[in-house]
Structures are given as C-alpha cells and as structure tokens.
Image (tube, grey):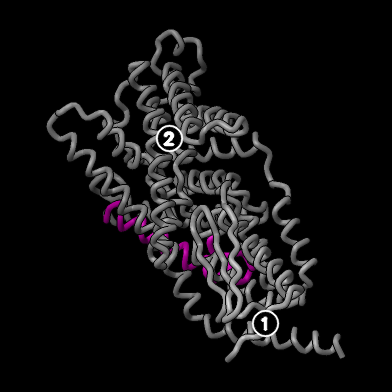
C-alpha cells in the first residue's frame, strides 16, 4: 500500500509521539526493568499512540533507546539516553498501569505526558536513613542465614547501616560509583571487624553485658557488605539472555561484575591493611537455626532490600511472605543430615531452584489480583537467596592467589556455585512469568483490540 505524504503538522505530532514513547521506555530502563517488560510496555504505548507497527522500529540498549518511524517517503529517528539505572519498583508499576489506563481512558497526549511527569518526579517512599537502616538489617538477616547468632546479627546490621549510608553520601557528591562501592565495602568490613573485639577481647568481655557477647563474632564480616551485591541486575541479566536480548543482558552482566570486583577490592584492602583473619575462605556458612529463625531472617532481608527498590508500603507484607517461602524452601531442599540439619540434603543449586520456582508460581497468581507487575514482587522475594558471599569469595580467591595448592580449585568452586545459583534463581523467577505471558498473549491481544475499538468509536462520536 502506498504511504501518504507526511505534512509538517503531522511531522510535529509524530515527533511528540515518538518522544513520549522513548520517555516511557527510558523510565523503565532507568528503573531496572528487564528488557522483555520494557518491550511489552512500549508495544502498549505504541498502540495507544496509534503508531503503525509496520513503520515503527525500536532498539532497546542499556544506555540508549532508539526509535525510527519511516515510510516510503520520510524517515524520523530519535534517541534517548538512560543514565541513572536506579532500582524503582514503584515507577515500573506506575508505568505499567499507565500504559493500560491510557488506552482504557482514551488519554490525550497532554494527559499522558502529565502522568509521565508525575511518575518521573514522584516522591520516594523512604528517606535515606530509613533505607540505610532497613538495608543494614537486611544484611543482618543474611548473616543469620549464614549461621550467626542474634548478637552478631546486630553487629552485622550496624556495620552495614553505616557502610550503606556512606555509599549514599558519596554518591550524592557525584563520586565514581565503583569507588563509592570500594570505600563503603572497606568501611563496613572494618566496622564489622571492630565489633568482633566485643566478644573476643577479655577486657571488653568483663565490661560489656553478657547479652552483647557473640559466639559467632566473625560472621558479620561475611554479611556486612551484601547491600552492595547487585541482585536485581543479576536476575535481569539472566532474564534478558533467556529472552534473546543478548546485548543488553551482556552489558548488565559486565556492570554487575565490575560492582562485585569493586566490593571485593574494598574487602581485600581492609583484610590486608588491618591483618584481619581470612574469614573469606575459612569461615563456615552452614547454619544451624530453626526454621522459625530462618523465616524471621528472610522476612527482614526481603523487606529491607525492598526499601532500596522503593517498593510501596502495602507490598512489604507480600514481599516478606515471598522471602519466607523462598528461603525456607531453599533451606529445606538444600540442608539435611549431612550438615546436621533437617531437610532433603539436595544441595544449594536444587534448593535455590525450588525456592525461586515455588515463590514465582505463587506470585503469578497474586500479581494478577493485586495488579502489580510480577517482577516487582518476585525479585525482592528471591533477593535473600542471591549468593553474594560466594561471588566475592570466588573473586577474592583469584585476587589473593599465591601459588598454594588448591587455590584455583577453591576459587573455581565458589565461582561455579555462585553462577549456577544465580542462574537457577533467575530461571525459577522468570520462567513461570514467561509462560504466563505466552498463555495469556491471545487474551491480551483481544483486550487490546476491544479497548482500541472502543477508543476509536469514542473519537468518532466526538468528531461527529
């Protein structure tokens, strides 16, 4: 079919529509949505804007979004940068709702743009100190999962709170992100090391009350920097690769690797400068707690990290339950008689897969009823299972290699265990949601066409 000539007024309108389309996509990318979700939202936005998909071409990259609209006569291309890459579940949810509401309520372009402004400049639910405190206690929850007692939980939390707040302060001063990570990891490790003297120093043992003594004084050093581990980018990386978005997924993976390297260097400098015992390779991570304690620690970690992700208050109880289900299922399948625990004794990989699949299946049904995107509940729920300690133990083993027999084996073991655990967590989180979207695709298309048909009838009535 021969395309019509695009006149100057039509060109101005088209430019505005393409700007709105790009702005919608950049909001999602800058809020750490996975690429498949970005594509679904942009396709809905394209239908709302009445853009012909036969003429529209989109390219989604980690740093730049590009859209081209062309026919036989004209070609319009626009770009938009994505620079912030924060994690904001509220924005992801709001944009998803907006793309449906715009079609359903027949928004004008001005109304749609106003809604985008409100989403982009909307306030965060938590203050910096609230986020730091919650993230610190989340790290303490990790510490319990590694086998620490409750006094050590508080020491790990305090070190993480101060380290995380320092990272936020340095970031506000526009310092390089990786330097911020290295410095905050260094400081948090030193604070956790100093806390061990409360339990190890004979002088302090006589002064400090008994309830402040810990039988696991070294465990806070394993967990105090886990607020740095980029769990969401890791899961998005695997999700992007599974969905065929190789380039974007690879960039996410590379950025994640740089973050973990910066964290490992910060911890390594603290160990070398202050002569800290090598807790990185020798300290056992096998817990011996009751499942009630595992549940409490998982809920604390899930809700704590949710504040970093700007998850709405009303979703915190759901995320807490998701974290409990994921971690307790993982531990039941993972632990067993071989390590003095109750469970199936199937190992970390099978446990992580079982926990992530189960919680993701449950959230598939919950998200449809509460009208919250699956990612905004499932990812905070499985974050307490991300093996951050194994990741930096692997890197530290290679950084500190001195030619001792078994160093390479130890490093590779930790690396493979961490990689496999992350892979199965991401697969378990993504696959139920992917299958749901495939099963519902025909229903979604019918819903699109019904809403668009209603919209066109309303527009015709207004014209008439």
Would you name the residue on which mark 1 appears? 5
Number of marks present in the image shown: 2
Residue at the far top: name it: 203
Q: Tell me the tag on residue 223.
A: 2
Disc 1 element: loop
Q: Position of residue 173 (x, y in %)?
A: 61, 30
Majority SS type along the magenta span: helix
Q: Nearer the viewer, residue 410 or 339?
A: 410
Query: Which residue is found at the position 51% from the left and 31% from the top?
Result: 180
Magenta segment = 346-375
Confirm whether residue 334 shows in the render. Answer: yes
Q: Quadrant of residue 414?
A: top left
Q: Quarter of the image holding residue 388?
A: top left
**Camera-nearest label, 2 or 1:** 1
Neighbor class of circle 1 (other Cα within 10 Å; few <14, some 14-19, many 20+) is few
Which residue corresponds to the image point at 28% horizontal and 48% vertical from the top-left? Answer: 417
Residue at the farthest left position = 405
Residue at the location (54% across, 54% down)? 32
How dense is the environment of label 2, judged by Cα within 10 Å: few (below 14), some, or many (20 and up)? many
Residue 168: percent from the left, percent from the top?
A: 59, 33
Q: Does residue 207 lie above or below 108 as drawn?
A: above
Q: Secondary structure at mark 2?
A: helix
Q: Quadrant of the N terminus?
A: bottom right
Q: Is residue 426 visible?
A: no
Pick the front one: 1 or 420: 1
Out of 265 and 71, give the one closest to the viewer: 71
Residue 175 position in % (x across, y down)? 55, 31
- Image location of residue 340, percent across then percent down: 28, 44
């Amino acid at each position: 079919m021969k395309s019509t000539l695009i006149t100057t007024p039509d060109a101005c309108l088209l430019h505005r529509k393409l700007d709105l389309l790009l702005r919608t996509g950049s909001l999602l990318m800058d809020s750490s949505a996975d690429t498949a979700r970005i594509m679904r939202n942009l396709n809905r936005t394209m239908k709302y804007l009445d853009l012909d998909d036969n003429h529209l071409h989109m390219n989604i990259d980690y740093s730049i979004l590009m859209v081209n609209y062309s026919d036989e006569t004209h070609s319009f291309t626009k770009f938009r940068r994505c620079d912030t890459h924060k994690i904001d579940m509220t924005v992801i949810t709001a944009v998803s709702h907006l793309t449906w509401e715009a079609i359903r309520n027949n928004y004008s372009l001005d109304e749609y743009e106003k809604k985008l402004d409100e989403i982009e400049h909307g306030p965060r639910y938590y203050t910096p100190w609230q986020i730091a405190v919650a993230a610190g206690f989340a790290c303490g929850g990790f510490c319990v999962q590694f086998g620490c007692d409750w006094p050590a939980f508080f020491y790990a939390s305090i070190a993480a709170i101060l380290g995380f707040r320092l990272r936020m302060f340095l970031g506000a001063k526009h310092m390089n992100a990786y330097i911020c990570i290295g410095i905050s990891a260094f400081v948090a490790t030193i604070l956790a090391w100093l806390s061990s003297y409360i339990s190890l120093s004979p002088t302090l043992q006589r002064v400090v009350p008994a309830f402040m003594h810990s039988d696991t004084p070294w465990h806070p050093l394993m967990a105090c920097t886990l607020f740095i581990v980029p769990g969401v980018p890791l899961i998005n990386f695997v999700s992007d690769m599974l969905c065929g978005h190789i380039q974007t997924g690879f960039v996410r993976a590379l950025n994640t690797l740089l973050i973990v390297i910066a964290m490992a260097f910060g911890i390594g400098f603290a160990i070398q400068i202050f002569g800290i015992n090598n807790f990185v390779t020798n300290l056992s991570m096998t817990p011996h707690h009751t499942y009630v304690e595992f549940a409490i620690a998982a809920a604390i970690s899930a809700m704590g990290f949710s504040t970093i992700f700007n998850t709405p208050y009303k979703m915190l109880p759901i995320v807490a339950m998701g974290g409990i289900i994921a971690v307790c299922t993982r531990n039941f399948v993972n632990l067993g008689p071989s390590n003095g625990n109750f469970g199936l004794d199937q190992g970390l990989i099978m446990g992580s897969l079982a926990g992530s699949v189960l919680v993701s299946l449950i959230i598939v049904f919950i998200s449809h009823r509460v009208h919250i995107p699956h990612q905004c509940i499932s990812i905070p729920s499985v974050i307490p299972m991300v093996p951050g300690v194994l990741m930096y133990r692997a890197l530290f083993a290679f950084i500190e290699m001195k030619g001792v027999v078994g160093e390479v084996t130890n490093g590779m073991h930790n690396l493979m265990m961490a990689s496999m655990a992350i892979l199965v967590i991401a697969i378990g989180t993504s696959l139920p949601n992917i299958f749901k979207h495939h099963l519902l695709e025909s229903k979604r298309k019918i819903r699109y066409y019904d809403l668009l048909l209603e919209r066109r009838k309303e527009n015709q009535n207004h014209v008439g």
